[in-house]
Image (cartoon, rainbow, N blue to C red):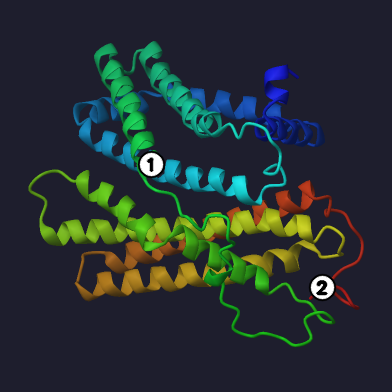
Amino acid sequence: MPRWLQARPFLFAGVLSWSNFQRQHRAVLPALAVLLLISSGLLALPVVGHLLEIAAQFPVTPFVLLAAGCAVATAHRKTSVYRTLVDSWLAPLAAPASIFVRMALVPVLQLILLMLAISIPAVVGSLSLKAAITLWLVVGAAYGAGCFVGWMVSHDKSAGAPAFHYVTVRKPRACWAQAPRLEPLSYWAMGQTRVSTKPKVTAGAVLFVLLALPMGTGGGKAIAIAAGAWVVLHLAALDVSAIRVAFSAARWLTPTTVRYLPFTVALGYRTVVAQLWACGWVVFLTCGVALTGALRIGLISTAECLISSCGAIGVASWLAMRSAGMVGKRGGMDGGGVR
């Protein structure tokens, strides 16, 4: 390892973590290479170039959407980086925190990938050079503006304190030490969702969505689009929170004999119920205003959302248990195990 990297423990720990993960899972790099090849083939399709041509004709919309996403991601990353200065085991070391490098690494990699993604249709001829240059400028300007706005947002001063006050346990048990259960995993997933969808986060995202609307859009349509964006953000936050809890919980439960099915059900059932509740209200309200085909479209969208969520949580649980070494263990949740 270079001496420059060894002198920065936060970066060095990240590189070692990725190296250990790659050694444990040798198929990761080949899978990423295959995924990149498949993505390159899809980007070479004529329909992708046509869609990018349309996006280049209306550059304001992709600029606002990319800037909004980058700003929200930068604000979250800033909070996470500053939190490590308080609660990380590396915090007491008298060494550089490498805040700028850790903040800039992810957006720079994303920017390079997006630039390459735009270059592929331009090389195969499905996207004109003028449109490609326009999209390159839009993406670069959007990432610059989004990173600047996200960095200027003041991070939470209580970033070092755990957000346990967002987690509601409705059925506390006095016999927790003698009879532990897996049910609190679902509470933690819901609590992380409340943290990631706080009003100050959703308000910024919805504001950027409203700014992306063309002039002359009616007030009713604008409110409906903002509400739809909030619902999509809430549903996505539920999935992401469940996936994050799966990997954290698997590390804590490594010494136990928890099986895959009980672990997955305990983790994801409350998430799926919350998504079903939100989608049900959306379908009910759209049917109440007598939108054409609202019931059929709402039921199909709800089914797709639930199926994709169940699949994502199931795959994340399996990967989390596999990375923690829990796959293949004998035993189970019966006869004194964790219930």
Q: Is residue 304 visible?
A: no
Tell me which corner region of the image, top left, top right, bottom left or bottom right, holds residue 242: bottom right
Q: Is residue 218 visible?
A: yes
Assign a secondary structure to mark 2.
Answer: loop
Q: How many marks?
A: 2
Mark earlier in primary sequence (1, 2): 1
- Residue 196's label in the rendered image is none
Q: Residue at x 75, y 32 (%)?
A: 16
Q: CA distance from mark 1 to mark 2?
A: 42 Å
Q: Tell me: residue 305, above or below residue 149.
A: below
Q: Residue at x 87, y 76 (%)?
A: 334
Residue placed most toward the observer, 73 or 2: 2
Query: Which residue position holds label 1?
Result: 150
Q: Tell me: residue 110, above or below residue 283.
A: above
Q: Residue furthest front?
A: 94
Please state which amino acid type lies under the numbered disc 2.
Answer: Val
Q: Determine whether, in the image, residue 66 is placed left or right of residue 246.
A: left
Residue placed most toward the observer, 297 or 92: 92
Residue placed most toward the observer, 27 or 242: 242
Tell me which corner region of the image, top left, top right, bottom left or bottom right, holds residue 223: bottom left
Placement of the N terminus among the 4 image quadrants:
top right
Q: Residue at x 31, y 40 (%)?
A: 65
Crowding around mark 2 (Cα neighbors within 10 Å: few <14, some 14 to 19, many 20+) is some
Closer to the eye: label 1 or 2: 1
Please state which amino acid type lies under the numbered disc 1.
Answer: Gly
Assign a secondary structure to mark 1.
Answer: helix
Query: Which residue position holds label 2?
Result: 338
